[in-house]
Image (cartoon, grey):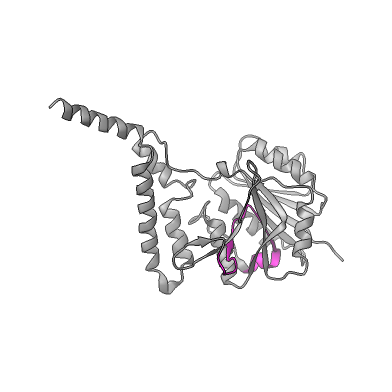
Amino acid sequence: MQTPTIHIILPVYNRIDTTRAYIDQLLAQSYTDYHLILADDGSTDGTADMVASRVDNLTTLRGTGDWWWAGGLHAGYKWLLSHPPKDGDLVLLMNDDVRFEPDFLSSAVQEMAGKANTLLAATAYDIHTGESTPNCAYMDPVYIIFSADSANEPNCCSTWTLFLRAEDMFKIGGFHPKLLPHFLSDIEYTLRAHQKGFQILESSSVKIGVDFESTHNKPHNCQTISQYFQSLFSKKNADSPVIFLFFAALRIPWKKKHYFLRYLLRTLRTEARFFLTGPLPADLKRGIQRLKNVLANR
């Protein structure tokens, strides 16, 4: 029986030490029939050269700094469209900052054997505490509420690591890097797949370690109000109301589109609460103090 080649789409950008650690783990795999598609978004630290010097079966795609996460995955998707894999081959969407054991790829191949129309996510654990955390969840498509304990089967998951058959990826389609360049692009993608009839499966035999302390950028502890709002609407911010609005517009059923206005208001209300109860920007603190001084001297 012919073994599947795993086509790994790996977005990278100027994290040569992180990517080097990933390559160390990849080269230690017991399953060696893989093809690495390195989506390098214009790194200037030698990342692409380092990978090229160590990985034989490699395709390098080069961006100019505006791909972000979803753009890198979409570039890999388009490359696979123009270079169709053989029947039965797998695609792996993956972060370069996760940790995995030498049996990671072989366990996934075994898990995917005989499973049609399936997206397989690894079980994640916190590298600091060892505690497992759900990687798949059920998302209410109207209220956009996520639950890992729902009685409903999972309909979305992250793409820290996501295995699927190449032909299934082509059925699902690519990403939306202009609308969802980074955060929520994986949730939108897997939710779309589920809505097209694909099963979302999380495997306890396929595991990854994740550094949860470095996964999100929150708009707190900023020094100025300008910095706060730049951070709030940044592509790096997981709670950006603009990102949530695009996500809701893409995935909420058309007849329920009025719900995303409610959702946007809820998101803005949450951010306002963080702003009012969290550490105030330094320039706002100074302004308040000056106002207090003026009032005290009247």
Residue 35 lies in magenta, yes or no?
no
Residue depicted at 42% across the width and 74% down the height: 255
Residue depicted at 87% across the width and 66% down the height: 1
Can residue 21 be seen at all in this image of the molecule? yes
As rendered, which of 150 and 264 lies closer to the eye? 150
Q: Which residues are magenta?
A: 150-171
Residue 237 place in picture, x, y as percent = 47, 47
As rendered, which of 298 and 283 lies closer to the eye? 298
**Quarter of the image that includes the C terminus:** top left
Residue depicted at 42% across the width and 59% down the height: 245
Residue depicted at 64% across the width and 69% down the height: 199
Residue 218 place in picture, x, y as percent = 46, 43
Can residue 94 be seen at all in this image of the molecule? no
Residue 159 lies in magenta, yes or no?
yes
Q: Quadrant of residue 148?
A: bottom right
Residue farthest left in this picture: 298
Total count of labels: 0
Residue farthest right in this picture: 1
Residue 296 place in picture, x, y as percent = 17, 27
As rendered, which of 208 and 54 lies closer to the eye? 208
Residue farthest top in this picture: 297
Residue 272 place in picture, x, y as percent = 35, 48
As rendered, which of 89 and 229 lies closer to the eye? 229
Q: Is 281 placed above or below 125 here?
A: above
